[in-house]
Image (cartoon, grey):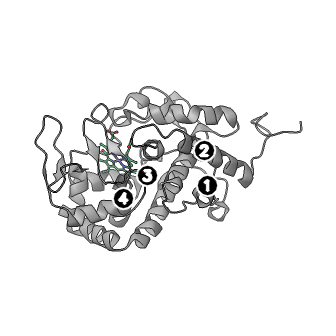
Amino acid sequence: TKGSAGQSAGVFKPTTEDYQKVYNAVAKELWEKDEYDDGSYGPVLLRLAWHASGTYDAATGTGGSNGATMRFAPESDHGANAGLKNARDFLEPIKQQFPWISYSDLWTLAGVCAVQEMQGPIVPWRPGRQDRDVSFCTPDGRLPDASKDQNHVRAIFGRMGFNDQEMVALSGAHALGRCHTDRSGYDGPWTFAPTVLTNDYYRLLMEEKWGWRSWNGPKQYQDKTTHSLMMLPTDMALVQDKSFKKYVEKYAKDGQAFFDDFSNVVMKLFELGVPFESKPEDRIKFKPTIDDA
Ligand code: ZEM
């Protein structure tokens, strides 16, 4: 057969340009659907890619973004994944438009698109993930529990193969988005500009005064100046722990260092456990659409 774009999944060999088309389609929807939440699907798309990837267990090689098993119960019903249906549904029309891409490649590509379109760094990405069936769903409990301390953060991210510096760099994603009482039970955004990636998360951790919020919900911190921002117990663990804190200080002072390290660690996160046939040098650097906006 001639294998024209998208018609026969077995034959069609997508090029970098084809993946850039998918990127552009995600970006277009991101910019068009600006009524959602704080004005962008970007944060929830990044969270979908992270929760798909963050189930990885280095010891057994199970979990990770390969498989997109969050399409299925029980994984879709895990408490940590509450609200991520919004992101999966957002991407469904894109999947229909480009049927040759796997859900698992699409979810991570959309995570990259979200970071870049929210003015973050370029995150190199490569395809190669294959969707797997319900039997590959990971057990509940592999994602971090926000009510816990630094030992938990180290145990969860250590299981994936990350070091302290990488754990702190990854956490800067909380510059984006917010907590929703009907999803996690927690409430509010971490920063004043939750749809733009900056190092504000670290700056606020260092410079703001934080106290417990008095409310009926789960234990969380609020800023003492405006009472409108929040930190989770696991966020505050990053300044309560000496080794973590030195990286928080670094990223608070140096936004470029944060961007460089965030790009590397998100790239690594999205590749955990994926049996790539391609080489690291084959990674694609998608062109952001906001350059010409
Ligand atoms: Zn989050 N995260 N996260 N995170 N996260 C939430 C929201 C978002 C933790 C966590 O419990 C929560 C990473 C690490 C950790 C994002 C990205 C990344 C929420 C709020 C909670 C409770 C969910 C809600 O109510 O909608 C914990 C405990 C973490 C580590 C210790 C890493 C790593 C991330 C990406 C690299 C993002 C973008 C959001 C915002 C989602 C949204 O819908 O606005």
Q: Which circle's residue, 3 or 1, is located before the other in the chain?
A: 3
Using the numbered discs, state the Cα–Cα distance from disc 2 to disc 3 in whole angstroms: 35 Å
User: Which amino acid does the dot numbered 1 rest on?
Assistant: Thr
Res. 122 image quadrant:
bottom right
Q: Which residue position is annotated with label 3?
A: 58
Residue 149 point in image, percent of width and height:
20, 52
Looking at the rendered structure, the secondary structure element under dot 4 is: helix
Determine whether label 2 and label 4 are within 8 Å by CB. Answer: no
Residue 69 point in image, percent of width and height:
50, 34
Left or right, 219 with respect to 286, comes to left
**Residue at x 21% of width, y 57% of height:** 237
Using the numbered discs, state the Cα–Cα distance from disc 2 to disc 4 in whole angstroms: 25 Å
**Residue at x 70% of width, y 38% of height:** 100
Q: Work out whether residue 277 or residue 267 is closer to the camera in this orientation and state it.
A: 267
Image depth: mark 3 or mark 1 in front: 1
Looking at the rendered structure, the secondary structure element under dot 2 is: helix
Image depth: mark 2 or mark 4 in front: 2
Instruction: Say which mark, if any, is on residue 172.
Output: 4
Using the numbered discs, state the Cα–Cα distance from disc 3 to disc 1 in whole angstroms: 35 Å
Q: Residues within 10 Å of mark 2 (few under 14, many from 20)?
A: few
User: Which amino acid does the dot numbered 3 rest on?
Assistant: Ala
Q: Residues within 10 Å of mark 1 (few under 14, many from 20)?
A: some
Q: Which residue position is annotated with label 1?
A: 289
Instruction: Say which mark, if any, is on residue 28.
Output: 2
Image depth: mark 4 or mark 1 in front: 1
